[in-house]
Amino acid sequence: MNTYFKYYLMLISVFLFSCEKYQIDDPALEVTADKTTVKAGESVTFKFEGSPQMLSFYSGEFLKDYNYVTNSRALKNCYLSFSSATVAAIRQLNQLSVLVSADFDGKYAIDNIKAATWVDITRRFTLAASTTVTPSTEVDIMDLAVTGKPLYLAFRYITRPQTEFLAANDWNITAVLLKSKFDDAEVTLMDYGSGSNFSVFSYGNKQAGRSLVNTTTIQFKGNATAEIKEEYTEDWGISRAIYINPNDLGKDKATALKLFREAKKESYTYTYSKAGTYTATFVAETNNVYGNKKVVKQIEITVTN
């Protein structure tokens, strides 16, 4: 045989051996369920055949859905609600306002707060008319969102001279909640946070300690000291930045069942808490310096009440 031909065959053999040596095989995985119809709160056990390097699980529930691994869940609404209470008989009128700004600069000083553009949305809500704690209506404020900017929520309390406009009313704001609704769940965008998500700032000659934030309540009170009861004052209970639009919840997350070099996973037991139809998804992976391969196995689980 020609020497060059032999050399050529040898090179081909080496090349084919190298390709085979560094070839990544598809991960081996088969999945079965001990039952595909269960009651809410009843467990289902998945059994595995094969031993992939890595194995992860998506239950199909909200934020755990394989369909949203590459597609984000965009926020389409933002519902604001809160509760309020005031005095037994309203005296000074129109003291409390609910405001939203998309151009506040985030510098928490009274001059910066007053310099921002605030949209008055008070009329959208039900406010208390007495000391009885009154839940507001739940209102979608998504129409106020501006692309690329956060929203700020403020409760503004104005006290005018109390001889001319009558005595100031106490106002308490509690249970502030902003949430986004989806077909299958709700997500909290901001809540009262034991007071950590709000701060109070005052304008004018305001008596210390009258308006404040505590762990449950934004409290507004007018001046009580005689010599300053005729002063015009403003108190602003203002929130942290609320990121709504553009905004999404990111990619849905998996539960890692087996990591690289961990022992073979024989089974996994999971419990669905709510009725519905879910696609349980298992993703097996082989991963090294030469590449990555995945195999996806899915089983439909029906959960009844």
Image: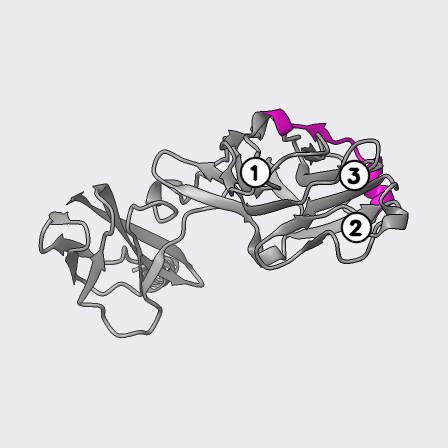
**Residue 224, which numbered label?**
2
Q: Quadrant of the N terminus?
A: bottom left
Task: Tell me where residue 136 appears, x and y as whole percent.
Answer: 52, 35
Closest to the observer, 52 or 304: 304
The residue tagged 3 is 159
Q: Say which element carries label 1.
A: loop
The answer to whether residue 119 is magenta is yes
Mark 1 or mark 2, which has the lower sequence index? 1
Amino acid, disc 1: Ser
Q: Are marks 1 and 2 in contact (CB under 8 Å)?
A: no
Look at the image and give the residue range highlighted in magenta: 110-123
Amino acid, disc 2: Ala
Is residue 163 found left or right of 86 in the rendered image?
right
Q: How far apart are labels 1 and 2 at the CA level?
A: 20 Å
Q: How far apart are labels 3 and 1 at the CA level?
A: 18 Å
Look at the image and tell me whether residue 23 can be seen.
no
Please identify, in this view, whether the residue under mark 3 or under mark 2 is nearer the observer.
Answer: 2
Q: Quadrant of the C terminus?
A: top left
Mark 3 or mark 1, which has the lower sequence index? 1
Identify the residue at image location x=86%, y=49%: 226
The answer to whether residue 243 is magenta is no
Amino acid, disc 3: Thr
Task: Tell me where residue 161 appears, x and y as whole percent.
Answer: 85, 37
Task: Tell me where residue 199 appears, x and y as whole percent.
Answer: 71, 52
The residue tagged 1 is 130
Residue 143 to residue 290: above or below:
above
- Number of residues whose C-alpha sits closer than 10 Å to that of mark 1, classed few (under 14), some (14–19) or many (20 or more): some
Please identify, in this view, whether the residue under mark 3 or under mark 1 is nearer the observer.
Answer: 1
In the image as oriented, which residue stretches furthest toward the left?
34
